[in-house]
Image (cartoon, rainbow, N blue to C red):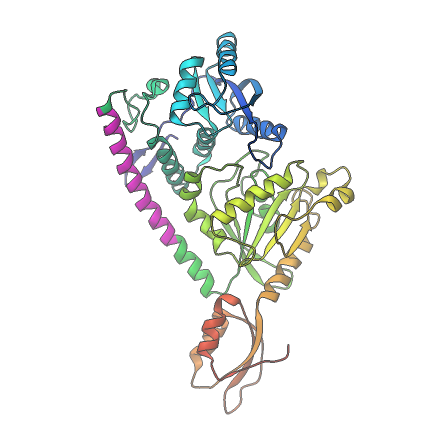
Amino acid sequence: MGEYEEDGGAIRGPKPYIDRQTKPTRTGLVCPDVRGQSTYHSIESRQAEFEGLAGAIRLDIIFSEVLRVREVRPATFLGAGHVEALAAKVEEEHIELLLVDAALTPIQQRNLERETGTKVLDRTALILEIFGERAATREGVLQVELAHLNYQKGRLVRSWTHLERQRGSGGMGFMGGPGETQIESDRRQITERIVLLEDRLEKVKKTRAQQRQQRTLAAIPVVALVGYTNAGKSSLFNRLTGAGVFAENLLFATLDTTVRKIELPHGRDVMLSDTVGFVADLPHDLVAAFRATLEEVTDADIILHVRDIANPDHSAQAQDVLNVLEELGVSSETTPIIEVWNKIDLLEEPGLTLAGATPAGRVVATMPVSAHTGQGIEDLKLRIEQILGEQGRTYQVHVPHAAGKDIGWLHSHSEVISREEPTEKGQDFVVRIDPRHRSEFLERFNGRISDPGV
């Protein structure tokens, strides 16, 4: 992950799993197809995605194989015949790293390394490696390091021999030797570092909460973009805001949440939030570490679920996104979700393809767009505006002259649609109140509210 500056000194995070300082690591990919294992994704799409993950950090991929697994072996995950064949291939192709598209236990990882004679990493470690390379801000580095350490903490039963060459000066000291005393020392150092990181991220969480509170007081709705990695969220964000957020045909191109104000067609302002992409089997430690960032999603007024409708696997990807949202406590019952069917410019027969697509779960609308060409973007803005309008209920409220602070409250917490000329008794307003402010509004203006029939 490299170094980052904090409190006037260099804080050094964990060394990366993969050493790419000299030349690309010669890598073999293994995609186990476990019999009876329930999954939304076809083995072909899983293999293609795993190759994309490995390619995201530009490894030298020598081979990629699907291995049929009748039964998971506790010792090595893969069957003895597969392990033997892999060992021969490792030697023949001079493979330096084996990536396995599965969640390996520490024992399985250690035994596979021993049997194949090369470094072995599982899906979680690879995703952590990608996040470690992508993290650009101090917050991002902290979040990735926390997830990284939680993952490593459970793997200190092993000697870390494949990382010996990375133990030089500047390391955190927990990549040490095989002795039990060293393992306990390493575990203690990791635990202390985790506590420190959690404390710093708690401060980040409080800062974000204050920022959200300011937006709430300003009555600016929040629209959050979510979606599978590489679905085109950042491209859509750029198209809607005119911002220059990094967007590339690359898995996990965006890690750090970006928020921008945009104006909808009839003048209403909203805050648009771009978030980290999701992926199948996203490590729980990673979701936990990024929870402060993802709270932009949990507090959103509308969620735009961006789907790469040109991807043959888009239905399964959409289900993975819903699973992560559920883990975050977000549901369509509480937050309106618009499915944005992106990349329609890549469809050979758009009408036929879109007719065959179905929403994932309950949504308030599906909007076909192309973030690349701009097709459908104005319709999307209008739909966002319409849904925000439907969320708010309209009231007529009377404000006496002596209650001047109430006028300030209305301007801060509602959309003032119209106002009457002041009279001797005060002034009448027609306002639209969002659900989040309704209870406070009803309590504050009790006895002075009527239905304008609007």
Residue at figure coordinates x 30%, y 46% from the top left: 199
* In the image: residue 411, left or right of residue 371: left
Residue 137's x, y, as percent?
41, 40
Residues shaded magenta = 181-207
Q: Nearer the viewer, residue 202 or 88?
A: 88
Inspect this view and state whether residue 20 appears.
no
Residue 148 lies, in percent from the top left, at: 38, 34
Q: Is residue 434 above or below residue 424?
A: above
- Whether 391 is drawn above or below 362: the answer is below
* Residue depicted at 47% across the width and 72% down the height: 439
Residue under the image location 78 percent in, 45 percent down: 351
Q: Quadrant of the C terminus?
A: bottom right
Q: Is residue 95 magenta?
A: no
Q: For the N terminus, give its image quadrant.
A: top left
140 vs 443: above or below:
above
Rendering coords of residue 145 (x, y %): 37, 36
Say which quarter of the image contains residue 206: bottom left
Residue 388 as seen in the image, left or right of residue 173: right
* Residue 202 is a magenta residue: yes
- Image coords of residue 237 (percent x, y): 58, 47
- Image quadrant in which you'd find residue 379: bottom right
Residue 213 shows up from this direction: yes
Extreme residue toward the bottom, this view:
424
* Viewer-proximal residue among 123 and 215: 123
Against 137, residue 451 (above or below) is: below
Residue at image coords 35%, 28%: 155
Question: How many labels were placed on the picture?
Answer: 0
Prevalent SS, magenta region: helix
Horizontal side of residue 264 vs 448, given as left or right: right
Furthest-top residue in view? 92
Determine which quarter of the picture holds residue 428. Answer: bottom right
